[in-house]
Amino acid sequence: MKVSARTETFSRSFGFHLVRIYVIVCCCAGFQLVTSVNGESFLDSDTRRELGTEDNVFDTVSASKIDTAVDAPSPEDTMIILDDDDEDDPNLWSYDPSEETTEMTTLFEEDMDTLQYDTEESLIIEDMTALPTLAELEDPETLEELESVETLEYDRRKLGNCNLHGSLPCNEDLESAPCSSFSSLVSSVASTTEQLVIPCGECFEVDITDGSVLDRAGGILLEGKLYFPPTSNVTIRTKFIWVVGLLKMDTPNEGNKVTFKMYGDELQVYENAIRNETCGVDSEGGTCTMGSKVIAVMGGRLDIAGTEEDCPSWEKLTASGQETIRPFQRPCEDGECWSEDVIQLRGSCRHSAGHSDALGKYTIACPIMSTGAHIGAGTSLGIQFENLGQPVTPFEYPVDQNDPSKTLQLTLNGGCSRAGHTDHFGKCTVYCPLQSTALVKHGHGVPMTFTSVKPPPMPFKMPVRNGVEVNLKIASTCGHSQGHTDAWGRCVLSCKVDPTLNYGRGSAWSKMKLTSRYVAPAPFVFPVNNGQQMSLTTRSRTAVSWGHTRHRKRCVLYLPIVRTATIRWGIGSPVVFTSPTTGNSFKASRVMHWAWGGANMFYYAEDYTVANCQQAADDFNSAISVGESLEVSHHVDEGYGGNSFEIDKVMHWAHARKWFFFFPSESDPTTCAATSEDFNSKFKVGYNIDVSDPPGPPGGETFEVDGVHHWAWKRKGLFFFPLESDPATCSQTASDFSSKFAKNYGIEVSYPTKDTSSSVGQVALASKGIHHWSWRTSHMFLFSDDTASDFNSKFPPGSRIKLSYLDSFEVNDIQVTPAAARCWKPGTEILLTSHTRSYHDQQVRTIVSSDANTGTIALDEPITKPVSLADHSDFAIEVASLNRRIVFDAESDATDDAIGGHVVIHHTSVGQHIEGVEIRNFGQQGRLGKYPIHFHMSSDSPDSLVKKNVVRNSNQRGYVVHLTNNVTFEENVAFDITGHCYFIEDGAETGNVFRRNLGSGIKMMPAERAIQLGESSGRTETDGDSNGFNGASVFWISNPSNYFYGNVAAGGDKNGYWFETHGLRREMSLGAFEDNEVHSSGRFAFSTYSPGWRPVETAYIRNLKVYRNRVWGAFLHVTTNIYFDGGLFADNGGKDAMISRADNLVFDGTTFIGQSPFANDNGNKVGIHFDPVRLKETVLWEHKGYWKGTTVKNVRFYNHSQPMQFFSHQSFVKAYNAPHYIENVWSDTPAMIEGCMSNDPTIDDLQIEIVADDNGDVTPTGKAGFLVSPKFTPMISNCQGYNGCLQFCEGACLRTVTVIAGNAAFDDDLNMVVTRKSDGQTLLIGKDQRGERKHNRFSAAYTVALPKDDYTIHFESPSSPGTLQWPKHAVPVFEAAPSCANHLIDSDLVFSKPESRRPECDELIYNGDFEGSSWGSEGWHSFHHSLQHSPDGGVGGSGAVATIVNLSQSNKPAQFLDASCVEAGNEYEIAFSYKIVGGDFSSVPRAKIETKEWDATGKNLARGRAHPTGTSTSVDGEWTTLKYQWTADNTAGKADQLRFYIDGGAQKIMVDNVLFTKTRGGRRERRRLR
């Protein structure tokens, strides 16, 4: 039994122990999965089912069982892979094959948190859970928030089992069996719905030669041999084909074709499946659902030779034919094209600064009339613009965007006003309410003239609901509404009206006129209560009601009456009381209560005041006698009709049926009371209020408009830009408009008549092309040779523009090799891959004629002149035949066009030969495992060859190998593929060979289908994230242990070659990667992002050609040990190579070309971009000293604005820059290396060794030395300026040391002071950190580059220079040694520590009460996840911290202790208070201490654990306080790093009042830290 390097990881907890088992996921290749030891299973049944390993495991690790297992490998081949963190532990169990049985017991004895912590630190955390944008990748201020512990979802993928379909015994002599007539067999099975069976052991030869169609709806079961000779010429339509025997197909004769046309939506079931968990089979034999339209090899063999051996599948284009000027073609995208050949400007063009900065090319944006299509793509071809002048046609009103039968009508529904858009656009924008019209959201950016159209006279329409109209009859005196006035800041009046229609709404802002109208009063009717009508007979004399009078401040009288019905209410309008006997009368302005208690009437005396109220009573008594029955009548003063009053708006027409609120035109709130009196003087109680529109403007008036933003937003809003655009006067401009265009007025639109003859014929150029043809149909973004101002002077708004190509040619014929011309016959479709950075520029044509002697091929349509070998040997495009004489085709599902056919080699390791097949419309989108060609769990298949096929129009992926090894894919073509194309599915596949394959036109899978696919696979499928950084790739490489030779990734939506190596596959070695090419990729040509690739052995990328890609040529993220040997990077977008958080990279003999003649100029170019941020594993976890940054040697740079650039926007990491190496590099740009990083905080610790500069192209002197950041130069002699941010130190020999010191969660800012012993020269290095300080679990760092000498190092505070301090711990990490010999070594550094018995050592916990002044929890962090600080959630309302998940999920509150304080024998009392806030309330948390000692020999921090003892417990309400005693032993006394933490189970806790107090001193072993 051998212990091997880890390959896969599964973790499972058992009580207080965690067992981690690493297994090789290659059971198909003869290995077995070990999941238990001596009968104790590591995995529960659910996990075993999840892994698909219920029975394919050994239940115990024992030699006897291994030896007796059926088909079991030898013990030497069975692997248990132990975590390499524990590889030196002498207690770990090991296996001796000579022993009968060995129990693996001590593995379980390690404390759970030890192993769990190992897991935490060994898992890579660089994987992004959310993908940043391209801008965020270069400027990811919050990138730390996107990182998380890897979920290992790929490692938990169902593995299935590895049983294989076997060949049928009756087929042993199949190759020599004579063949019978296939036609006869078909005739014998009369029903087409019956399955056609090719019997086992028998051969049938297809003798159909007339091209006829044979329909077999019942499917075909091929148990024997079915042979298609060259004479075959037939189409077979069927729903499925099971290949259990042999399907042999020779190349059809010229003119013949053999087609399998698959159809049918129903899922097909294979009846004789092997036992397979994936199929849901529960016993030996059974059924397996294989999907619809399937060709499945189930233990059988395909032997297909569909093309001649010497016929190329694809090749580089030799040359192109005679050039002619290319006519302009209407741009198209996704089936939508421009509706016309010319464009018309809607407005003035403007400089787009954002695009200019991002693209490195001057860009202007021009608003254009809608082209009818959103064309987000552009062109790299130069474009000429010619002004055809402005149109003389009348303005055409736009139509409803949802209903073309509705045309825009502009009728105002109120006054216009200044719009908030004014502030956004910086120019006046006016809003006008419209009467509902067509929905037209867009506008028109050209100058126009608005002409007012006066409507015919018409009566004002009062609000109506259900046929009932609002009626405004004044019921009482109107008044000032103080509350509304205060709220609106302008005068608001209200009138009580007789009850009417309840209508709480108001009107739009629009002038209206109110007119008073006299209405004769109706006869008075006494009120009724409970069926009893009151009567009014005086019982006594009237008198003053002084209480009411004083309260109301009005003269109120009361009249005792003969008892009648109780009527407590009154009337708000004037009434007259008349004596029927004398005719005398008395007028009341209102009645408060008709019959209060049935015996008293209360009323207001009109024309009397409080002062003469008694006179009013006397006057009533003199006019009316006691005992009289009074008559009552309404009173309305005459003579007030026809009065008018102007208002701006009605707030409420009839609130609660009886309140009329309105805004008078006299709006001053300070004079609102006077405005109310003025209204009451004209509008008396009892009068009706009539409403009308005021006399409007005359109509026919004009207003000049600079453009319209929205014609009819939500059908009711017009937004336009007046010609007078000053925002400061915009309100007045809107008022001026409203003075001409009133409510109900129409607006006619016309173009202004201007003389534009001077601009006709003007020409402008966009020689660098177009960025967006028609963004959202109405904006063109172009790389103009003219400034925006100059362009506008040639093309004023309204101009019609003719477009033509600038120096663009097309050809009608091409030249290929004679072999291709001989094989590719007339009628053959050919693909010409893209000659630009966009794969959309690929071209498909049909051959009209071909000449095998000259290699000339004539095409049915001209093509844009491509780049050929005749132009340049490195940049030629590819030309491929898209047709074969053997075709697998499929109909789509009736309800889903993305469901075609699929081919699967299912659990079949026998060698397959699939050559020369054209596969169309295969792949079933969103269905797992349904691909055009799919080797599925077929173990080792070294005899399988997939060659010279073409997969086109695939709905889901292309060539897929899944848990199958050693298959060869050679000279295949893939075109128009949805999803990843050449696809290594699970990452367990090795040894597969991909040689000279071509992929082009690789498209993103729709996001919803990728999600559907992921739901089946149990992982995130990355070929469907259209908004993400990555996506569908031509070659998706999940396991690098495969072989890639001479392939070409010729373009797609996203990446060319993407190494997405999850889990421990990130550490696997490369098989081979030689002579591959990539161009026309939409995102990254060669990418390791994400999650990064870090092979243990150096991976050699030999002679890779990366050119004409839209974004970056190579993106090397979180990556190490990659060696680019030779190769070419050219014409890529922005950066040829982007290095982000990577180490040990080499570019040797590589050529970088920023701009060649074979691609348009797309802005500033950087050759190699070094992001100085490091892998955190490099210096935080890996201390071996072998990290070397990037080496650039024997490299040449051409036409770059900056050949090499050090820059990072990732200010969340200040430091950790590696040493870099440059040797004999040449550039045609004088400023070879840019080291100025202007971001704040800047990264200022560059160290670049110039190993050699034989031609003097890098350094000022042509000598070896170092380029360094200026802060290092005090320790270095012979330095001179290189540029503003680097100095060159000739002859220097420097080594980089990064001191891991302290913890970034503390709010200290200690400086590290390096002192040279020989002369006392000092160098002060500031603290760097990774991420923000709050709850930061990482150590801080101090990076320095030093020459050989003896140094002392100490730490001090800027506020107390000279006073020794200690940053909790300090560990020197010596990085890779330079090439020069006399360099710094470990023993050259000595650290000076402060006295261990200083006062601050009496209490080791910092901020234990969580009352820090910055963020409250300074000094504290958690193993994983964050902590949540509560300023008042602690004991007694003090500060505290809480875990956000359970303690058992490594959310352990922790703090690094000052290791310089702890001596062996010291005694401490440890205490903390806690309360459980979630989860398991029965489990008790506990204090623990972690110790680490620096092992200079092993270059690591050896880990240990200390357990405090003597726990005491006290409880105070919700809070429990735990106290411990701990005595530091020799291990703790010698420790270089100490960490206190609180551990526990499945509960979330809140923590307060943490103490770690020394109670007795001991002795510390004195050591020099070297």
Image (cartoon, grey):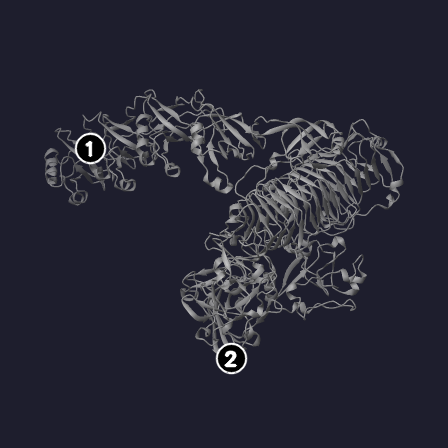
Position of 497 relative to 134 (above/below): above
10 Å neighbourhood of mark 1: few (<14), some, or many (≥20)? few
Marks 1 and 2: in contact by CB < 8 Å?
no
Q: Mark 2 points at which residue?
A: 1562
Q: Nearer the viewer, residue 474 or 1286?
A: 1286
Q: Position of residue 859 (x, y in %)?
A: 68, 27
Residue 5's place in the image compared with 1019, above or below, is below
- Quadrant including the N terminus: bottom right
Taking depth in this image into account, of 461 and 1296 the one nearest to the observer is: 1296
As helix, strand or loop, the secondary structure at mark 2 comes to: loop
Please tell me which residue lies in front, 1456 or 173. Answer: 1456
Return the disc, 2 or 1, that comes first in the chain's sequence. Answer: 1
What is the three-letter code of the residue carrying label 2? Gly
In which image quadrant can residue 1433 be found?
A: bottom left
| Residue 1484 visible in rendering | no
Q: Residue at x 73, y 34 (%)?
A: 817
- Whether residue 760 sits left or right of residue 1185 in the image: it is left
The residue carrying pointer 2 sits among few (fewer than 14), some (14 to 19) or many (20 or more) residues within 10 Å by Cα, namely some
Residue designated by label 1: 678
Quarter of image, res 828: top right
Three-letter code for the amino acid on which mark 1 is drawn: Asp
